[in-house]
Image (tube, coloured by chain):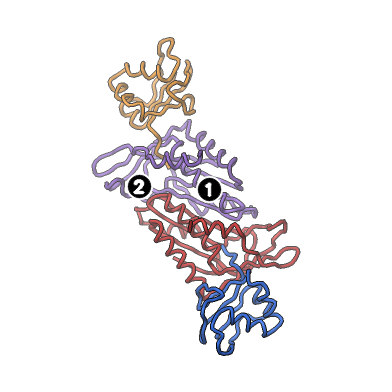
Chain colours: A purple, B red, C orange, D blue
Amino acid sequence: MIRVQTKDFDVGRELSSLTEHNVSIGGIVTFVGTVRGNAEGNDVGAMTLEHYPGMTHKELEKIENTARERWNLAGSLIIHRHGRLKPGDRIVLVITASAHRRDAFEACEFLVDWLKTKAPFWKLEETSDGTRWVASRATDDAASSRWTE
Amino acid sequence: MIRVQTKDFDVGRELSSLTEHNVSIGGIVTFVGTVRGNAEGNDVGAMTLEHYPGMTHKELEKIENTARERWNLAGSLIIHRHGRLKPGDRIVLVITASAHRRDAFEACEFLVDWLKTKAPFWKLEETSDGTRWVASRATDDAASSRWTE
Amino acid sequence: MEVLYFAWLRERTGISQETVQPPDGTDTVEKLITWLKGRSAGHAEAFSDLDVVRVAVNEEYAKLDSPISAGDEVAFFPPVTGG
Amino acid sequence: MEVLYFAWLRERTGISQETVQPPDGTDTVEKLITWLKGRSAGHAEAFSDLDVVRVAVNEEYAKLDSPISAGDEVAFFPPVTGG
């Protein structure tokens, strides 16, 4: 399941609704990405996430489908927020549930790596030096390419 | 932080209390282990987790300390339940929080692998064929030994 | 043809979306970019370093040599930084 | 010396904890096991396959050749299956 929204999410509630009544599940892995209060030495006052509405949902669904083909998952969920966020705010939630923990761990990490390199979102940081568009990280590309080797 | 208890835990509340007000955190990884409703082809009606009270807390603390030495963590939590549990019930919660997601993912998977091979808990399953002590899994030993290679 | 700009490409061109009619023969992304650069100084600046520009055609990732035609939606944006 | 049994070792010995006074010279885990096996048929059965028995001395993992002495707490249990 994919959701793209401005409002916050409740991790406990999402976990419950994805996994309850499914007794084939043995392990659930959750990733929550949050806004850090500093970046490259500058304090970050806020951040605005812009996205490409027509493409975002489709791209996230493709990534989720790829994970579900590669790993044996009983459930998965991606929620990605956009709009203006403050340090400490949640940005993204990824949940993977499986009979066995290894599938859940690998699929969750895969989803996070891929959405960081494929999902059309861009971060504009507000620091004491002004605003700047966050540059993509070579480490993210490397993390994503791990899964195609 | 370590907690060993019979009662259930609230994942959302534990996440919040571990991470709120810490704006150095960028990624939080959570593992929830649950009781599966079947094992080796048999339906499981319930499961009782026995443990060695004097040793459990110490052993989990050692494992947590090892993770905190190896990875850059802003917070970590392990909750392990004991007593009688039903299919779908939560058994264990592991949370790792870090500035960067890779540390959080690796430390969380390490903690789960190690507690499965080091923490003194034993599962007694109640199936339609009677009760049986769950045998340790060679795959768990292999998973744990990954971290020492 | 609809052209969309995101993040700093939107800021440099000053436009989030424009309907354009490039000349006949503008049948690849690369040719479209060459033509778009002539539209304003902002456009020229936005496309000055194609290493940091990504493109999608009809909401699917594409490349410089990908084909385009009238009626397509072509979006330009920097490498993504979500998650 | 306190000896503790968990899981099926507790079931086979029929005991969760016993205070024992093994003879002088019982200075390793292995020697203690040899002596404990003589206490009952259940003890003998519990220790019939040491490949599936783990031991802790004073709440720390130990081995068959680990030293023990009076006053120690020695716990026997199967390979763990928590998590």
- In the picture, the disc for residue A4 is none
- In the picture, the disc for residue A106 is 1
Q: Secondary structure at mark 1?
A: helix
Quarter-of-image position of residue C56 = top left
In the rendered image, residue A39, in percent from the top left (x then y), is placed at 31, 46
Q: Secondary structure at mark 2?
A: loop
The chain identifier of the residue carrying mark 2 reads A
Viewed as shown, does residue B81 lie left or right of A144? right
Q: Identify residue for label 2.
A: A86
The one nearer the camera, A46 or B56, is: B56
Which residue is outermost to the left? A129
The one nearer the camera, A98 or A77, is: A98
Q: Residues within 10 Å of mark 1 (few under 14, many from 20)?
A: some
Camera-near label (2 vs 1) is 1
Viewed as shown, does residue C47 lie left or right of A117? left
Looking at the image, which residue is at 51% across and 61% down? B114
Looking at the image, which residue is at 48% across and 63% down? B78
In the rendered image, residue A139, in percent from the top left (x then y), is placed at 39, 42
In the rendered image, residue A128, in percent from the top left (x then y), is placed at 24, 44
On the same chain, marks 2 and 1? The answer is yes
Viewed as shown, does residue B88 lie left or right of D61? right
The one nearer the camera, D28 or C37, is: D28
Identify the image quadrant of the N terminus of chain A.
top right
Q: Residues within 10 Å of mark 2 (few under 14, many from 20)?
A: some
- Disc 2/disc 1 C-alpha distance (Å): 29 Å
Viewed as shown, does residue D10 lie left or right of C7? right
The chain identifier of the residue carrying mark 1 reads A
Name the kind of residue labelled 1 in the image: Glu
Circle nearer the N terminus (2, 1): 2
Name the kind of residue labelled 2 in the image: Lys
The one nearer the camera, B29 or D36, is: D36
